[in-house]
Image (cartoon, coloured by chain):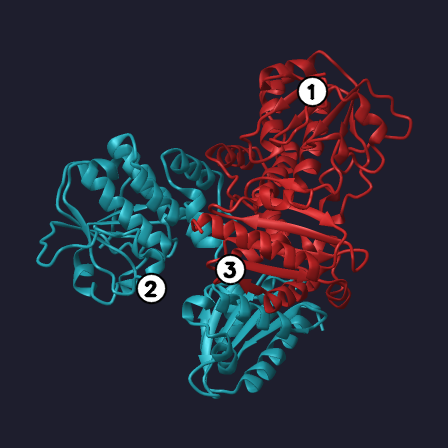
Chain colours: A red, B cyan
Amino acid sequence: MGTTMLTIAETAAWFKERDNFLVLTHRRPDGDTLGSAGALVQGLREAGKTAHALYNPETTPRYARFVEGCWAPDGYISEHIVTVDTASCSLSPLNGEEYFNAVSLCIDHHPSNTHYAEQSCLKVDAASCGEIVYKILMALSDGISAKSAERLYVAVSTDTGCFLFGNTTADTLRVASLLVEAGAPHRQLNKLLFRTKTRSRTIIESMIYSGLEFYFDGAVAISTITRAMMESSNANEDDLDDIASLPGSVEGVIAGITLREMASARDCKVSVRTSQSVDAHAISSHFGGGGHKFASGFTVEKTLAEVKEELLEILGACFAAQNGN
Amino acid sequence: MGTTMLTIAETAAWFKERDNFLVLTHRRPDGDTLGSAGALVQGLREAGKTAHALYNPETTPRYARFVEGCWAPDGYISEHIVTVDTASCSLSPLNGEEYFNAVSLCIDHHPSNTHYAEQSCLKVDAASCGEIVYKILMALSDGISAKSAERLYVAVSTDTGCFLFGNTTADTLRVASLLVEAGAPHRQLNKLLFRTKTRSRTIIESMIYSGLEFYFDGAVAISTITRAMMESSNANEDDLDDIASLPGSVEGVIAGITLREMASARDCKVSVRTSQSVDAHAISSHFGGGGHKFASGFTVEKTLAEVKEELLEILGACFAAQNGN
């Protein structure tokens, strides 16, 4: 079964013709899925529709206020399931699996989208799902409230690291400009989302920087996060936001690897961030993972030392191939 | 004597009617003054004018390529002196003082501009001078080359911390979007300007974070940079760019203090960054320094320990006064 691709205008029309929506966010929800859901629910309600978001139990305090008042009440019977920023059914939130059998509409920007919904509004050039939701809401109502603008600013800015990441486009900046004009309190949001670190975050960053290991003349940097580090810094998942970008931010590094020891010593989560000619997806696919060209990841049942050794072999082969050896 | 205020359109017309320009940047040149000058010279040349920038001997390697080919040749006789991003004559570059007696046009965004030029195109709501230059070039030629766009992106992005700082406006983001559309290689520029840390920088950051001291229930954070730290991290002045913002970025901190040991143990440079109700200028003025409400500094002939003790006394009095004790 395939999905029917909808344009922005068709998606807006689809919403206009229907009512009673339930919006789903993805597992380990980030600013883009929560901000997009919060704005979509808000915008649909302002357009006279009944819309709620399915409670996502993994929502962190950092983002909770951007979906406040959006969670569906007990017993809510929806007619149309809509997902935002969710590439596949496997990314269902912990309590959402039953809904993924019958998704009416998927709004997403991931190239890896598996076309699981009846209809899809898929824009793989968009840096964030928030940009797509912005356009849908504008097509739906020819305007956007300050509340929706705030939530979409959270979506767009967090997925682009405040317009810093390589996915940022001219269109991202244009949408951000329009969101600020529509009343998004970007100064407060930037301070909250990008200019504030918890003490635990500063401690774990300090540990990561001082423990960075460099290989291949500094082209590869490996950062290791052990359970002991997590305990001594008192860091939680929120404190590790975008932590995988740290090793790649060092001058001269082409491949930045973050190894994290999870529940046990043989439960390892790996993030790969690359630039230039190194294919992050190809590296992670060796371990059954995947992702994008410059950002990928995987989990594996090996020790940190074992994974590191294997990764260095793969990276060595990769550099050797590039140098024509 | 006053200055005549020009609109964007009047400024473009002013350029159209004249030729042979010399563009001046300010002392300790940053991305905004250099990017603005580089783009203005480029845009004027593309409009058929003769234009050069006065060589600024303090230009760092980081920004040199954005004014490459712009420096005036020996013996160049200009008819019109234009300054960019320069609030007053006291900000003349080391070799530029003679020119500041006869500035024809000042393009600037600082509220503190002293109106020293015959004509001024002054837009105090602009986050960067680059935004103003962009509008002038568009009014001059109804278009902008990729080379000018690149230079203006440097100007706009560096003055706003890549759209993160509180000065960023909807218009900043709109101009940035148009610059990217015009060909500014924003991905490479962001990587170069904002996402690259030297190894020395990561080491010194790590040392600073692990050595942060907190006082007054975490409202004050003090960072100390000793000469020994500079030596062991092999850090230079470039590596310390914006380092004073680190303590203030920790959650809950209202006053972030950076103490730096300079040439001797009794030569101390202090940076104060505050938010909310704490007046950074007032704190530094106790030591003969000064600055703005939220950012100030001073140098003093005391040891780190002596300065710290005095600062904590002043901050204690400040908090006590605020709590009405």
The answer to whether the residue labelled 1 contacts the one labelled 3, judged by CB atoms less than 8 Å apart, is no
Q: CA distance from mark 1 to mark 3?
A: 47 Å
Q: Residue at x 72, y 44 (%)?
A: A63
In-front residue for pair B280/A276: A276
Q: Quadrant of the C terminus of chain B?
A: bottom right
Please, what is the three-letter code of the amino acid marked with disc 2?
A: Arg
Q: Quadrant of residue B134?
A: top left
Which x, y percent locates residue A231?
Answer: 78, 65
SS of the residue at dot 2? Answer: loop
Identify residue for label 2.
B28
Horizontal side of A209 relative to B64 (left or right) equals right
Q: Report the disc number at residue A47.
A: 1
Label 2 Cα neighbours within 10 Å, binned few <14 / some 14-19 / many ≥20: some
Please report, as a chain letter, where disc 2 is located: B
Q: Residue at x 80, y 38 (%)?
A: A56
Which x, y percent locates residue A153?
Answer: 60, 38
Q: Quadrant of the N terminus of chain B?
A: bottom left
Mark 1 or mark 3: whose residue is earlier in sequence: 1
Please, what is the three-letter code of the amino acid marked with disc 3?
A: Val
- Can residue B247 be seen in this snapshot? yes
Q: CA distance from mark 2 to mark 3?
A: 25 Å
SS of the residue at dot 1? Answer: loop
